[in-house]
Image (tube, grey):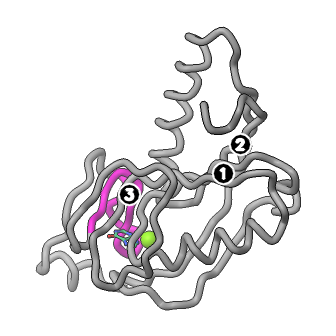
């Protein structure tokens, strides 16, 4: 809220994995808004990305669905991401968003993985640093499974073939 300078924010949720974090983050920002003398107006938008098959990045980022991103031009954008793994997905999304000339763009990532595959990207705001394991739950999936878990956990090696694509 300090960094946006009190300007209108477009909160952009990266689906599907980001929806739980997004909902909780917005609840929290709303609570801050209620308890401060000037509240920040906010609109929400959703984008859907897909780059993973099982626990592997396919390298190709697919943007499927979502509003016309040109609505972000001139806006202060806060992107909410579930996980920064190698960082390629977020970096690609950022370059797409920046092409539309937003006034400012910040990324909030719930989880940041420590991995040798990292391209060196760090989000502006991060929640937790996690080890190089494939995690599921709290909207994060393995082939669409486990999004319904309330907690984040590491998928076991026996679980992987059981839920393979
Ligand atoms: N879990 C779920 N989805 C992911 C992960 C992960 O560890 N890394 C990139 N997408
Ligand atoms: Mg996924």
Q: Secondary structure at mark 2?
A: strand
Tag 1 residue: 12
Q: Position of residue 90 (x, y in %)?
A: 55, 70
Some atom of ligand 2 lies within 8 Å of the CB belonging to the residue at label 3: no
* Residue toward you, 152 or 158: 152
**Label 3 neighbour load within 10 Å: few <14, some 14-19, many 20+:** many
Please give left or right for residue 157 compared with residue 149 in the image. Answer: left
Q: Is residue 60 above or below residue 88?
A: below
Q: Residues within 10 Å of mark 2 (few under 14, many from 20)?
A: few
Q: Disc 2, disc 1: CB below 8 Å?
A: yes
In the rendering, at what x and y percent does residue 110 appear? 40, 52
Any mark on residue 121, and which? none
Examine the residues drawn in magenta and state their main secondary structure: loop
Residue for point 62% across, 77% down: 92
Q: Are marks 2 and 3 in contact (CB under 8 Å)?
A: no
Of residue 34 and residue 141, the one placed in the foreground of this image is: 34
User: In the structure shown, which secondary structural element does the residue marked by tag 1 occupy?
Assistant: strand
Q: Is residue 58 left or right of residue 4?
A: left
Circle 1: is it few (<14), some (14-19), or many (20+) Cα within 10 Å? many
Q: Quadrant of residue 115?
A: bottom left
Report helix, strand or loop for mark 3.
loop
Chain part drawn in magenta = 135-148
Q: Quadrant of ligand 1?
A: bottom left
Q: Give me the residue at 74% from left, 66% from top.
A: 97
- The answer for how far apart the CA atoms under marks 3 and 1 are is 19 Å
From the image, tell me which residue sits under label 2: 44
Q: Earlier in the sequence, mark 2 or mark 1?
A: 1
Residue 138: in magenta span: yes
Q: Position of residue 116 (x, y in %)?
A: 28, 83
């Amino acid at each position: 809220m300090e960094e946006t300078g009190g300007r209108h924010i477009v909160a952009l949720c990266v689906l599907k994995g980001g929806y739980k974090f997004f909902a909780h983050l917005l609840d929290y920002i709303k609570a801050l808004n209620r308890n401060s003398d000037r509240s920040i107006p906010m609109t929400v938008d959703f984008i859907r990305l897909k780059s993973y098959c099982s626990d592997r990045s396919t390298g190709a980022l697919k943007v499927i669905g979502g509003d016309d991103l040109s609505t972000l031009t001139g806006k202060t954008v806060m992107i909410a991401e579930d996980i920064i793994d190698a960082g390629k997905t977020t970096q690609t999304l950022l370059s797409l968003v920046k092409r539309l000339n937003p006034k400012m763009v910040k990324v909030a990532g719930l989880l940041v993985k420590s991995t040798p595959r990292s391209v060196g990207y760090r989000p502006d705001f991060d929640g937790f640093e996690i080890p190089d394991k494939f995690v599921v739950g709290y909207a994060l999936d393995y082939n669409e499974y486990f999004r319904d878990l309330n907690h984040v956990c590491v998928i076991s090696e026996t679980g992987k073939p059981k839920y393979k694509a």
